[in-house]
Amino acid sequence: MKKLIYMLLLLLTLLIPTQIFAVEVNSPNAILIDASSGRILYEKNAYESAYPASTTKILTAILTLEHCKLDETAKASYKAIMSVPSGGSTANIQVDEELSIEDLLKALLICSGNDAANVLAEYIGGSMESFATMLNTRAKELGAKNTNFVNANGLHDENHYTCAYDLAIFAKYAMDNFPEFRELVSTIRFRLPATDKYKSDDRYFLNSNQLIIPNQGTGAKNYYYQYATGIKTGFTTPAKNCLVASAEKDGISLICVVLGATQDDNGVSYRYTDSKALFEYGFEELVSGKVLAAGTTVETIEVKDAPKNENALELVAEEDLVVSISREDTENQFESTIHLNEDIKAPISKGEVLGTITYHIYDKDYTVNLIANSNVEKKADVIIGLVRGIGKTIIVVLILAAVLMAVRSYNKAKRRRSNAYRTFRYNNRFR
């Protein structure tokens, strides 16, 4: 009987699927994506509602960069400054102070100034409430699944929420489309300039993201990560510790989101240790694979209107296709589709785009142009060229023949004159 029970338990163990987690994440909500493709590498409650705190400012920065030039200036209203509650992070912006959009973005992303967020919201949306509507509209356009923002800064409100997945796609979009964003979120420190409303230049701020700051802590609290490149921290009491982070190594770019993080018994923050663990997992999982090399012959075609024996044309890849792929996968296992231009015929110039090849890799398509590897002349042009060549040859032969005939005639005439002269001298001897 015992043996039968043991066999039944063993059978159930084999039939019930088990999930083995390759990385341990303590935070309640997290996600890791391949920043180049958007492919999800790890997720934990990634679509569940969570408070984002100041990671909200990623979307605020997107709207700012989409609607403003960096050298524009905005004036801080009384409401924008005074509506930040006591204890909220600020850049010490003064009422009626005018600052450039660039400086406001620095204050927004580097020191997480809630006052800077409010100034930008009023400048772009006309009011902070209108700007919140703009944020929600843009979030949906970017593919958000579970986001509702009521302010530009992330200060707590029960109706202000998002999820790890949405923050990841916001961060990917910002990093992909705005070099200014990439630069700002990787900046360690900055200083706001003096203005007529604030005479001193002592507004000096350090980035709140300790992943990018060397020698900031000691032991387990030294959170510096050599491959980190940004992006944004957040904290409120209800949201706990939040972090949207990016890292790059060996051609691999990753973005992770950690929400609702706490700390261990020794005060070590899980938002940093979880992010590091996710990055290490991602870098172990992915490699940068060259799926297609520039100049590789993809297809050989016959070209219409080209001379026989000269109508074969190689189509080659115009550029490299490098994609992040799982380490166990190989570059040549992915399906590809070739699309050629209609009615390809001579004449064709080397380098001319004649089609594309598209690879379907992890539910995303990557397309590379196919170009001609050599010139192909038109058949008629070849015949005309041959005729012209023959014609030129005939002309040259005729000219040479004429020259030869002229030389021969000249030499004959010369000999006749010479013979006549000799005859004349001979005859004169007897006169």
Image (cartoon, rainbow, N blue to C red):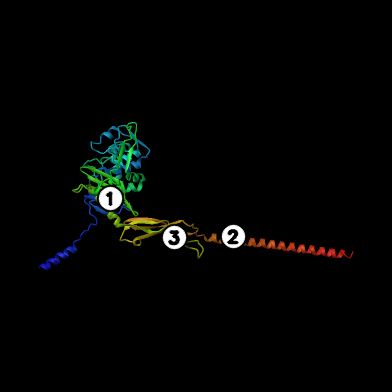
Badge 2 local density, few (<14 within 10 Å), some, or many (20+)? Answer: few
Residue 327 drawn at (x, y percent): 31, 59
Numbered label attached to residue 359:
none
Residue 80 vs residue 145, the one in the foreground: 80
Q: Is residue 429 left or right of residue 189?
A: right
Q: Which residue is mark 3?
A: 315
For image coordinates 29% across by 57% down, the residue present is 284
Residue 370's place in the image compared with 2, above or below, is above
User: Which is closer to the viewer, label 3 or label 2?
Assistant: 3
Q: Amino acid at mark 1?
A: Cys
Judged from this view, the residue extending furthest toward the right is 431
Residue of label 1: 256
Q: Nearer the viewer, mark 3 or mark 1?
A: 1
- Of the image marks 2 and 1, the number of the one nearer the N terminus: 1
Which residue is the site of mark 2?
388
Q: In terms of image quadrants, where is residue 358?
A: bottom left
Q: Are marks 3 and 2 in contact (CB under 8 Å)?
A: no
Name the N-terminal-most of marks 3 and 1: 1
Q: Characterize the local packing of mark 1: few (<14), some (14-19) or many (20 or more) Cα atoms within 10 angstroms.
A: many
Q: Is residue 179 left or right of residue 219?
A: right
**Residue 144 in view:** no
Secondary element under disc 3, as helix, strand or loop, is strand
Residue 394 placement, left or right of 156:
right
Quarter where residue 118 is shown = top left
* Label 1: which secondary element: strand
Q: Secondary structure at mark 2?
A: helix
Residue type indicated by callout 2 = Arg
Position of 304 with respect to 54 (left or right) is right
Mark 3 → mark 2, Cα distance in angstroms: 31 Å
